[in-house]
Image (cartoon, rainbow, N blue to C red):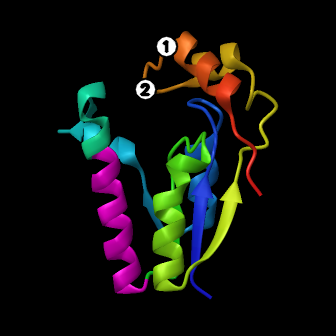
Amino acid sequence: MKQLVIMRGVPGSGKSTLALTYGGVILSTDDFFVANGQYCFDPTKLKEAHAFNQDRTKLAMIKGNEVIVIDNTNILRAHIQPYLDLAEQYGYEVTYSIPLTPWAFDAQECFKRCTHNVPLATIERMIAIWEEIE
């Protein structure tokens, strides 16, 4: 069965490290913000970045990739829904994956470990609005 793995977690929680363990194609909205090997986040382009990642996911599904991993924060169900719709359309079984690191919901520790300079206040807000799914 083809599998769509949806990573969930705040920046610095260990999502990307865990995503590597699944193999397959790893797709992240963050990829949109990488140019010449440098990560340059622009919040005004976030909607465009999500559309970019959803389009790449659709293409990967059309190609029939057996395992596709979505390496985004996916804090709310609304963030995940476009991927769920694609999974249904293309026959992918969905699995959610949350890092089991001891610091996964410790804002201070995630802030220290985060590689994209996400402000502490943003990480704290993400933890505060975290929506349980399943």
Task: Examine the image and state in which quarter residue 102 appears.
Answer: top right
Q: 109 left or right of 43?
A: right
Foreground label between 1 and 2: 1
| Viewport quadrant of the C terminus | bottom right
Front-lying residue, 8 or 108 = 8
- Inspect the magenta stretch and tell me whether residue 66 lies in it: no
Using the image, tell me which numbered label, if any, was put on residue 48.
none
Seen at 47% across and 81% down, the residue is: 89
Q: Position of residue 127 (x, y in %)?
A: 68, 26
What is the spatial separation of the Cα atoms under label 1 and label 2, in whole angstroms? Answer: 9 Å
Amino acid carrying mark 1 in the image? Pro
Q: From what the image shows, is residue 18 above or below residue 88?
A: above
Q: Position of residue 65 (x, y in %)?
A: 44, 81
Q: Which residues are magenta?
A: 49-64
- Inspect the magenta stretch and tell me whether residue 61 lies in it: yes
Q: Position of residue 42 (x, y in %)?
A: 26, 27
Q: Position of residue 7 (x, y in %)?
A: 60, 52
Using the image, tell me which numbered label, if any, was put on residue 119.
1
Using the image, tell me which numbered label, if any, was put on residue 116.
2
Q: 35 left or right of 52?
A: left
Q: Which secondary structure lies at badge 1? A: loop
Task: Give the residue at the far left of this rendering.
Answer: 36
Q: Which secondary structure lies at badge 2? A: loop
Front-lying residue, 104 or 81 = 81
